[in-house]
Amino acid sequence: MNNTKISDSAFRAVIAGTGSFIPEKQLTNEDLTKMVDTNDEWITTRTGIKVRHIASDNQSTALLATEAAKKAIQSAKISPEDIEMIVTATVTPEMVFPSTACFVQEMLGAKKAWAFDISAACSGFVYGLSIAQHFVISGKYDNVLVIGAETLSKITDYKDRKSCILFGDGAGAAVIKRGNANGSRGIIYSTSGSDGAGWTALNCPAYGSRNPVSKPLENPNSVFMQINGREVYQLAVRKIIETVENCMENCNMSISDVDLFIPHQMNARIIESVAKRLELADEKVFINIDKYGNTSAASIPIALDECMQQGRIKKGDIVLLVAFGGGLTWGANVIEF
Ligand code: UT7
């Protein structure tokens, strides 16, 4: 487990701008009823999802990521040349290599930046913010770009009703800027954890070194995401609550100090059950899964950007981002705006 507090640093890791990009094409619950044996009522009551967005054939992950990044850069009022590091969180990369982040760097013209991807599934963006926080509060960098971007539709089995109703495509981004100790406290605290023993609950096994592209696949379906929904559901509720409690303890806060809770959008029922157990008031819990489905690493930055656009985050607010996903991985960031 890795925990980072701002402690005595002279510098702050401030969210200076956010952006998101959602592909136009929609896949509704009604559309899915024509593909698998399902119905709107089941999907809505079990997941809260109504619509997800699907990338077109020529919309790759780097393209979605770049569009979101452009908006974040614009809202931070910097130029691409100001960015020193690009971290892209994704499980649906542009290629095996180079990294999606390198494609983004080229498309943005962020010539000064070094760029790399992180693979932490749904926790990718909170891991990314934690990495950015380290580099910024150490005084190393002034501007870091963190992106969560996914084209999950490309690894979704649209014949499997248990999984295909869940996932959507999209991207979100944030510029993390170096501030000083007199301004907003920015990212106050980050925590990240992993448990590799739980990898079987959630994975996409094909075409890595274990099941290489050079050999016929034992199971042709292994090119698609495999999920044990029930298991993930229970683990997610438990781990998200534990992670929030860890944040509150390490920040000397109580849950009533949190102004806005932005969890990974995995399932509205998971979010509601976590919120109830933490005694978080409904108006402090942000849910937009109805519009996008689960977009893995993109879900938190898309939600964060929506909250900024909607004016739901005011100066001085404490915002709590929490994620859980494949790996297993989990993490959180406590941010003062
Ligand atoms: O971000 C990480 C990735 N996300 C996840 O891993 C998702 C986490 N898990 C979940 O969100 C929920 O477990 C699901 C939404 C996937 C499933 O909800 P559930 O309440 O756990 O349902 P279940 O898997 O226990 O299935 C209940 C019933 C089953 O029928 P029987 O065996 O009781 O007759 C399923 O076959 O619902 C059936 N079912 C469906 N029915 C209509 C499963 N999928 C569907 C469907 N439409 N799409």
Image (spheres, grey):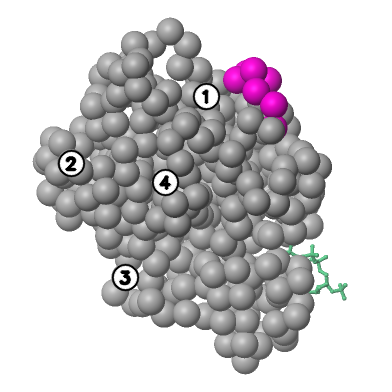
Q: Secondary structure at mark 1?
A: strand
Q: Residue at x 60, y 43 (%)?
A: 261
- Packing grade of label 4 (10 A; few <14, some 14-19, many >=20) is many
Q: Amino acid at mark 2?
A: Ile
- Using the image, tell me which numbered label, if any, was put on residue 89: 4
Q: Residue at x 45, y 66 (%)?
A: 169
Q: Secondary structure at mark 2?
A: loop
In the shown orientation, is residue 325 left or right of residue 61? right
Please name the residue that numbered disc 1 is placed on: 189
Q: Amino acid at mark 1?
A: Tyr
Q: Residue furthest bottom?
A: 34
Please name the residue that numbered disc 2 is placed on: 78
- Packing grade of label 2 (10 A; few <14, some 14-19, many >=20) is some
Q: Amino acid at mark 4?
A: Ala
Q: Earlier in the sequence, mark 4 or mark 2?
A: 2
Q: Nearer the viewer's eye, disc 1 or disc 4?
A: 1
- Packing grade of label 1 (10 A; few <14, some 14-19, many >=20) is many
- Using the image, tell me which numbered label, if any, was put on residue 59: 3
Q: Residue at x 78, y 41 (%)?
A: 279
Q: Is mark 1 within 8 Å of ligand 1?
A: no
Q: Where is residue 176? Give x, y as percent.
A: 33, 34
Q: Is residue 27 above or below residue 62?
A: below
